[in-house]
Amino acid sequence: MPRPPRTSIATVSLSGPLTEKLTAIATAGFDGVEIFENDLLAGPHSPEEIRLRCADLGLSIDLYQPFRDFEAVPADLLARNLRRAERKFAVMERLGADLLLVCSSVSPAAVDDDALAAEQLRLLADRAEAHGIRIAYEALAWGRHVSTYDHAWRIVEQADHPALGTCLDSFHILSRGSDPQGIESIPGEKIFFLQLADAPLMAMDVLQWSRHYRCFPGQGGFDVAGPLRHAVRAGYTGPLSLEVFNDVFRQSEAASTAVDALRSLLLLQEKAGLTAPPAPAVPTGIAFAELHAADTDPLRGMLGALGFTRTGRHTSKPVELWQQGEARILLNTAGTAGDRRAGPALTAIGLETPDPDRAVARAEAMLAPVVPRRRAPKDAPLDAVAAPDGTEVFFCRTDALDRPGWTTDFTAVPGPGPGVGPVGIEPVGIERIDHIALIQPWHQFDEAALFHQGVLGLDADDSLDLADPYGLRRSKALATADGAVRIALNIAPAPDAEGPRVQHIALATGDVVAAARRIRERGGALLPIPANYYDDLDARHELDPGVLAALAELGVLYDRDEAGEFLHCYTVTVGRVFFELVQRIGGYQGYGALNAGVRLAAQHTHRHGVPAHGPRG
Amino acid sequence: MPRPPRTSIATVSLSGPLTEKLTAIATAGFDGVEIFENDLLAGPHSPEEIRLRCADLGLSIDLYQPFRDFEAVPADLLARNLRRAERKFAVMERLGADLLLVCSSVSPAAVDDDALAAEQLRLLADRAEAHGIRIAYEALAWGRHVSTYDHAWRIVEQADHPALGTCLDSFHILSRGSDPQGIESIPGEKIFFLQLADAPLMAMDVLQWSRHYRCFPGQGGFDVAGPLRHAVRAGYTGPLSLEVFNDVFRQSEAASTAVDALRSLLLLQEKAGLTAPPAPAVPTGIAFAELHAADTDPLRGMLGALGFTRTGRHTSKPVELWQQGEARILLNTAGTAGDRRAGPALTAIGLETPDPDRAVARAEAMLAPVVPRRRAPKDAPLDAVAAPDGTEVFFCRTDALDRPGWTTDFTAVPGPGPGVGPVGIEPVGIERIDHIALIQPWHQFDEAALFHQGVLGLDADDSLDLADPYGLRRSKALATADGAVRIALNIAPAPDAEGPRVQHIALATGDVVAAARRIRERGGALLPIPANYYDDLDARHELDPGVLAALAELGVLYDRDEAGEFLHCYTVTVGRVFFELVQRIGGYQGYGALNAGVRLAAQHTHRHGVPAHGPRG
């Protein structure tokens, strides 16, 4: 395989002052940058200083941009535009940049005359060449007369100047619905630059779409690999550069956005067949979920009520293993996990993986931080990486024959231990962990989704909006094709909203009504669901009255689709975690999203208490 | 004038649990509510309890909604849909609601057959009538076969049942581009309900537009008064109800959103000619700006450098008057103004008003809280109301002949007082306050804009996005037609962003370069502007080299449009406030928005210090 292309990113894609952006870009591992003019203008550093800074950071300056509204204008305006260009060439010489992006004009002063545009661009290229500078002409999707890449190329071809080429941008190409196949008819050496950006598929004004909603490749709905593949086939050998205008990234920390950006570019190169990193080791199940708690008593009580038994204690760490069927929960009292006062939290998940070494190699190749292992010499090797939200993801082979499994680090312990209540709790029929729901910071939602897809090898469903009493919450489920591993990502409420960020573990059972009844009999606290919900359920689904009564009595929610049925109920929240019991009937693959609003409101009610019934006073 | 229509609002327009919404709606002063079904389903209160709660709060239940996907279906599905409807009628009887909203179907099961739709809706109306319930059929803009209001009306007309009428919704009508004039051909008694919502004009998918971006009338781009006027002319006498799905309102405090909502409805009624509240007393100038500070020394130093002189001291309060030309600044050390540790803040503005009494009557009619007056018996009457962001707005007549002016409360004091430096500072040519820039919490931006328009009588410009290093900031200018009063609203950065919310006072001068030079000579700290900005200014505007050098030397920014030129510079920030000096040449009416990104970045640099020049190490 040939050497992978160089990677680059436009400074406009990140937040902060220019020097902060450059540091983040270099630290993430990019080879070069596009300097966005406004970032230079607004900063206190001279072009020479920025040039030295880039050199020191090992970054090449691949492009200076944008130069707007140049071509196809009357003679007097042309003279003024050439003067303006000369001033920019001077800045570029000080900066050490040798490629200038010229966007197709949006000015009312421009006329619809390709020959005139070509003639004036040739003139510009001539002036540029004298400074050792080249011009990359790009069609903006909202350009006044030139808005498609093939049109921009025809003008470049007509101008026929060695210092004039075209710049391709996947957003402008795909948002216009152009066929990227035509890229292959452009000589590779005339493609001076390639910009890559994705975007969610939206029916909206293309300028607003571009300015606010672009995202990194793989986070939107475009096939960004298409234009990339065609450009490489055409012979393009320049850098692959991300140029993403996004309202969220403008507000996020530059360092983590830069890593997210480079990861998306690495995944894109793989998808386009330009590189061959270690393939994902698609997980085959959820081995365990790990909860951290300073005080484990509330969790012990909850796990006991749910029918879990403490089966083991780690030989070298303060960790207990609780189990029921194939569902395993680790209780960890070591160290700290964020705000201990906020109570127990979900800190790690274990994924059953056919090849843990490959899984780690994949994760490392995709820039996931490998979590330092603190283990005793005799502990089984257990490899973990950190997801963007900080959750540790361990790669396990629980029943491996060729190497010691992680469960061998646990010695059997008798009885449920303190805090559970009566010893000898019977299981309630929980079989395994159905899914894990992780709350994501609002500015890392897309990054997390791409991580779980690209690094872990899960497939993504579409995003949904769930209605919380205090705002909509975006949600996206990721799963393996067979449903053995399911992870639901939910966006956290607004930063100033009340309440901790609560995550949950969903446990699979073959009979949620029976399980819920047994849990309640032994005093396990299930989340009460309003009676009104069951009136509506009756109106919508015509359930058997006996079944409906049982659901209402126990607070079991219900959903149905073409493929099957879904019954689920929730425990109350302990600290920052709660449990769900789910029963899938037939081929139902969802998560009961229709019921999420009711559940979120019921949690709010439970947290704050039911307001006094009846009228006031 | 006839009695004004009753006011109502859908519970979906506000955040929080249902009982919290109802309390906010009643407290704001609405007459009734539409109960959005999900709000009832998700809450712990029975329909009977909600009925009693509404009665206790004095709210009528005007509508229960929505009932979806009913009409024009095959016989077996019709039977199921009628059963579903009966269940809802039962809930409505318990709730005491007698009007059900039926939305035009979006189901693939519906057929395109108006006669069938009419027949089935007649059947539904018959069943409803038996419960004393009426049906309001509404065309969703994205309905499968019925998506326009006139089409929905034709079906209602064809069904011809006394318990069946139509519901009109300004969003659905205007987003489809329908002509609302046709409303007048519907008999008033067949318009069972009228929903009012605005939205910003956006080219996007109408369902997404409706679900996320609706706003209160006057906050978007639709002429919502049009459908209202036509409905009243048709003979509609029911409530005017707001139904606004909005991502921001879902997260905001219900109490303040409800007030914002009712104010928009009162303004809309006035605009449609249904009511005649006191007209706005359009202000004729900015009388003063008031700054609160625990320690006034830094402000005294700044004001002295800017050429202000302390001219008076309030006879009964710890307030000083500083003046230069017609620009007046009050320095107040009384009480607290938010976080005193964050330093001086802008807390009040005084508007010159031809008729202060009418201005207050207008503000009260439009639900602006009147600020309690704490004044000594001999103080001049000075009326103030609170803007949505808490800024107090005083209505003044500085040079009134028929009543004591507010300046009579101040006694002349000699000299500039402590902290100013050399006594006898000369003015620098400041003539008056050009504008005040107020930072708004992100969820109150539209409310504030409507307040300044509807209550104060200013005209609004379009919104702009300004690029801060850490995010885009929405901005909107409001002004009187003659420009005598200008207020710029800027949205605050994200809630978790760094830095205090900084506001500013812009001072008008006839020669900003001379003023800046004199300020600098006496040690006043002006905000440094990067040299790169002037390179770009030269490229863009071909200024005279001497002028350009003077601008660069003093940090004066420049803008030009068809109407004229604009020169402006900034002081450094003191606590939560800074000053701008502006010079308008010709008919320039803007605020130098193009330069805002440079100014915001320069403020960031000044706050955090310039990173070390040159490469690291």
Image (cartoon, coloured by chain):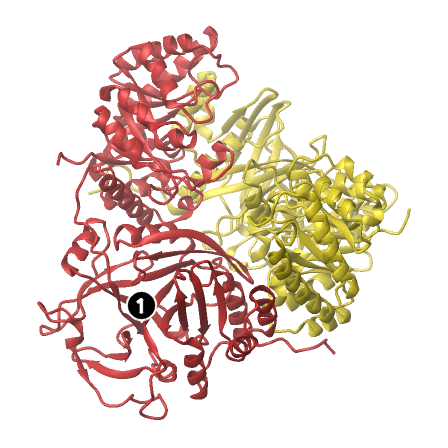
Chain colours: A yellow, B red
Pick the quarter of the image with the C terminus of chain B. bottom right
Q: Residue at x 13, y 68 (%)?
A: B400
Does any portion of residue A401 appear in the rendered image?
yes
Question: Residue B185: horizontal and vertical position, in percent?
Answer: 28, 20
Instruction: Give the percent coordinates (x, y) of residue A596.
Output: 50, 35
- In the displayed structure, B74 sits above or below B368; it is above
* Residue that carries the numbered disc 1 in the rendered image: B347
Q: Up-down: is A229 above or below B363? A: above
Quadrant for residue A32, please give it. Answer: bottom right
Along the viewing direction, whichever of A36 and A617 lies nearer the viewer: A36
**Please, what is the three-letter code of the amino acid marked with disc 1?**
Thr
User: Is residue A404 in sight in this rendering?
Assistant: no
**Viewed as shown, does residue A171 lie left or right of B347?**
right
Q: In x, y percent, where is residue A374?
A: 75, 60
| Outermost residue toward the front in this view | A75
Chain ID at mark 1: B
Identify which residue is drawn at 28% across, 42% down: B25
Residue that appears at 51% across and 26% down: A558
